[in-house]
Amino acid sequence: MTLPTVFLTRALPSEVLAKLQPYAQAEIWPEETPPPYETLCQKAAQVDAIITMLCDRIDAPLIQSCKNLKVISQMAVGYDNIDLQAAAQHHIAVGNTPGVLTETTADLAWGLLMAAARRIVEADNEVRNGIWRPWGPDVLTGQDIYGATLGIIGFGRIGQAMARRARGFDMRILYYDIQRNPTAEQTLGVLFTPLEDLLKQSDFISIHAYLNQQTYRMIGRPQFECMKPTAVLINTARGAMVDPDALAWALQEGRIAAAGIDVFDPEPMPANSPLLAMRNLVITPHIASASKQTRLRMAFMTIENVIAGLQGLPLPYPVPLPT
């Protein structure tokens, strides 16, 4: 009996692939960089399942060219790179890896907040470059975190995990989302606040919303103009939610004090981006979920979705498809 075929756009750990082996033949893209779109289309058209990453474009033309594809299993929580309407029309199941990276992502967001607020990376760079300025009242002064006001945009699992960390710093916590969460307001002591008011009041602003038409470029010049000049912006959600030109302007002109950014639009960040010259910007290359434990669990969840989809069973971690 011939096993179904799966194309993986990146290599996964051997113990994860061992779980897939009894159910499918795997072809693995050998590079660290994503396969070119044309290659992805060619491979997807030949297999029964594909395992994808956030930077793989799974659009309608690709999906329409797939005659045998039964499941798209994405190793990520987000899935804005996948055309769900096309998947639904062609009866292709889509899975993701929700929940598992909540605390890991919140850890990195908090790390970026602290690093940007206290200018840790800037100070480290100075020392490594032979600069050790004498102690002085204004040398590398940053922003206090303890007792400050944190504004959280998007109050799902990760936003709430961020709030739990902020409580340990005795912060006043505001949040904005499309829906209020009275239960979380009581348990976490947070205050629902309209977006503009949140931007005006917050010392730190951390983005944890989903990317959609409403949140695309939700932070631009008008929003930066609402913020305090001492504010620090953190984004570990999606790069497209923040206008990169507006961010560069805000950092350059002192409209905000600093930012910590893990996600960009586009990715990778262009080599000529003015953001790379900003000393008051802490940059990481989309690594919010990058702990060994979390990535391994994500990989296993991805395989579990594939196995179920190939057997015609409901996916254990499904993405809801439009009807």
Image (cartoon, rainbow, N blue to C red):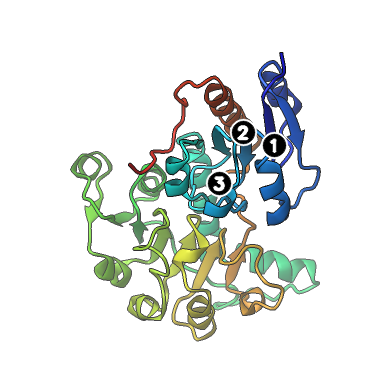
On the rendered structure, is 204 left or right of 109? left
73 is higher (above) or lower (below) than 170: above
Instruction: Report whether residue 9 is seen.
Output: no
In the rendered image, the quadrant that contains the C terminus is top left
Mark drawn on residue 63:
3
On the rendered structure, is 23 left or right of 305? right
Residue at the outermost top position = 1
241 is higher (above) or lower (below) than 3: below
266 is higher (above) or lower (below) than 210: below
On the rendered structure, is 11 left or right of 92? right
Percent position of residue 108, x then y: 55, 49
Which element is circle 2 on?
strand
Percent position of residue 19, x then y: 67, 19
- Residue kind at label 3, given as amino acid type: Ile
Which residue corresponds to mark 1? 7
In the rendered image, the quadrant that contains the N terminus is top right
When asked about the image quadrant of residue 37, the answer is bottom right
When asked about the image quadrant of residue 29, the answer is top right
Q: Residue at x 57, y 58 (%)?
A: 262
CA distance for labels 1 and 2 = 7 Å
10 Å crowding of disc 1: few (<14), some (14-19), many (20+): many
Which residue corresponds to mark 2? 49
CA distance for labels 3 and 2 = 11 Å
Which element is circle 3 on?
helix
When asked about the image quadrant of residue 294, the answer is top right
Q: Which of 137 and 260 is in front in this view?
A: 260
Q: Which of 188 and 167 is in front in this view?
A: 188
